[in-house]
Amino acid sequence: MNHPSDGNRKLFDLQGQVAVITGASRGIGRAIALRFAEHGARVVVSSRKLDACEQVVNTIRAAGGEAIATTCHIGHKEALQQLVEQTMTTWGRIDTLVCNAAVNPYFGPSRDMPDEAYDRVMNSNVRSNFWLCNMVAPVMKTQGGGCIIIISSIGGFQGSDRLGVYCISKAADMQLARNLAVEWGDSNVRANCIAPGLIKTDFAKALWDNPSILEKSVAHTPLGRIGEPDEIAGAAVFLASAAGSYTTGQTLTIDGGRTCGMSRSD
Ligand SMILES: NC(=O)c1ccc[n+]([C@@H]2O[C@H](COP(=O)([O-])OP(=O)(O)OC[C@H]3O[C@@H](n4cnc5c(N)ncnc54)[C@H](OP(=O)(O)O)[C@@H]3O)[C@@H](O)[C@H]2O)c1
């Protein structure tokens, strides 16, 4: 399963796989859903809004792929259970899980953050991923293996005076992937994070839509621009396919070089 020696699989082929993706109606999750389907996976497209997920499914089907849409608010444990059950009822397996949905309801110094906002960030970005991974990993074990991908952030490598608790949650996701890798490795279940830099999606609009923040970000990025959702989707295809079969417990940073050094003008 997902091993280069299994039936001479092509390295980036996802034929026969079933992939579940949270927050797949827009942005990075949508790009992963479209690219997974393009590489042969059957995709479960989920978010809080069914009509938005159905649009992604229609795009996948129009291109000849297979997908279903379902609602899943990641904050609710029973909704996560329902997501797993619906996938099993429809396709009977889960090969790849992408924990992509996350929230950030607060922008400012963390010392002023209300408890309610703290709880929302940590519950959605860490505890929900923890729940969902622990629901899916046993299914993967019975199938002989599987792949868990958690979308973290380069914020998880750095302190921040505006996004502090969000960054704490994204650092916790990296540790969650490492821990899952250790606990499930003997069942051939791999777990990794992808840590994107600034990507042009609705989630980060407040950053890339603000000329002074955008200018600063680009100036500190060796490639001199922000990223596109597809530039994250490619790494997800790598991790889910035979190409990623010896990769586990890692965080792949995809940030145009933002975290590798000083600004371009230094
Ligand atoms: N964009 C960036 O610069 C950037 C950088 C680093 C990391 N990331 C990470 O990348 C991931 C995806 O972000 P994005 O930029 O693609 O965001 P986005 O374009 O705003 O999309 C977010 C997706 O999550 C869904 N969603 C939001 N809250 C949800 C909830 N409680 N339950 C289920 N689904 C929910 C949204 O759909 P509905 O509204 O229909 O629910 C949507 O499909 C996040 O984990 C984020 O932290 C983003």
Image: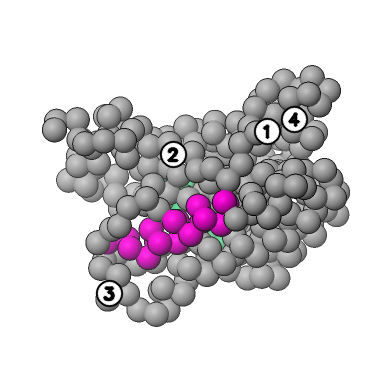
Q: Which mark is first along the chain, 3 or 1?
A: 3
Please report contact status of discs 4 and 1: CB closer than 8 Å, yes or no: yes
Q: Looking at the image, how many numbered discs can be counted on the residues?
A: 4
Q: Which mark is first along the chain, 1 or 2?
A: 1
Please report contact status of discs 3 and 2: CB closer than 8 Å, yes or no: no
Span highlighted in magenta in the image? 162-178
**Residue of label 1:** 245
Q: Quadrant of residue 4?
A: top right
Structural distance between the alpha carbons of marks 4 and 2: 23 Å
Judge: label 1 CB < 8 Å from ligand 1: no
- Tag on residue 111? 3
Residue at point 63% right, 70% down? 76
Q: Main secondary structure of the magenta part?
A: helix
* Direction bottom: furthest residue: 115
- Tag on residue 256? none
**Residue of label 2:** 253
Q: Which mark is first along the chain, 3 or 4?
A: 4
Residue at point 40% right, 62% down? 168
Q: Which mark is first along the chain, 1 or 4?
A: 4
Residue at point 21% right, 47% down? 213
Q: Amino acid at mark 4?
A: His
Q: Amino acid at mark 3?
A: Arg
- Tag on residue 3? 4
Structural distance between the alpha carbons of marks 3 and 2: 28 Å
